[in-house]
Image (cartoon, rainbow, N blue to C red):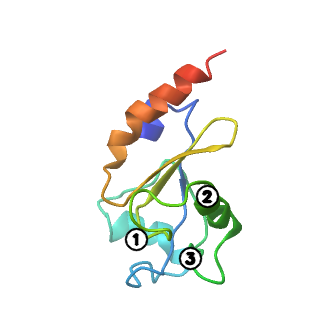
Amino acid sequence: QLQSKYPHRLVVLGFPCNQFGYQENCTNAEILNSLQHVRPGNGFKPNFTIFEKCDVNGVNTHPVFAYLKDKLPYPDDNPNVAWNFEKFLIAPEGEPFKRYSRNFPTIDIEPDIQRLLRLTKT
């Protein structure tokens, strides 16, 4: 929804991970098909980039998440990515801005997005 609302100023990236209750046990080749037909289903096709599965914690942590967790250690209560659907907002210059827990509704990030967009208008 946010990607559609800010198509030229916001880039949403999805990183599937199977470290949380084995909820993403599809192969990389199966992920998009699973999204479309299983969960969430109903023909869902993401309008954002989805990467291959990666680790977000532990010895094989993907470098993107090592960097993000270093810059934004935790949303409130946990230095590790605690569960799927944790979110990171990155400023247009590439600097990590804010980290949101899995319980924070994604749509509620919009005021922070608007704030960053106002700060970077040229």
What percent of the width, then of the height, locates residue 53?
Answer: 57, 74
Q: Can you tell which mark lies on residue 57?
A: 3
Compute the Cα span from label 2 to label 1: 15 Å
Badge 3 amino acid: Asn
Q: In the image shown, does 120 or 27 lie closer to the viewer? A: 120
Residue at 53 percent across and 20 percent down: it is 118
Of callouts 1 and 3, which one flags the residue occurring earlier in the amino acid sequence?
Answer: 3
Compute the Cα span from label 3 to label 2: 11 Å
Of callouts 3 and 2, which one flags the residue occurring earlier in the amino acid sequence?
Answer: 3
Query: Could you tell me if the residues under marks 2 and 1 are in contact, i.e. CB atoms within 8 Å?
Result: no
Compute the Cα span from label 1 to label 3: 10 Å
| Residue that mark 2 sits on | 68
| Residue that mark 1 sits on | 83
What percent of the width, then of the height, locates residue 12?
Answer: 53, 47
What percent of the width, then of the height, locates residue 28?
Answer: 57, 76
- Is residue 91 found left or right of 81 in the rendered image? right
Residue at 51 percent across and 74 percent down: it is 17
Of callouts 2 and 1, which one flags the residue occurring earlier in the amino acid sequence?
Answer: 2
What crowding class fits label 2: few (fewer than 14 Cα within 10 Å), some (14-19), or many (20 or more)?
A: many
Above or below for 25 versus 87 = below
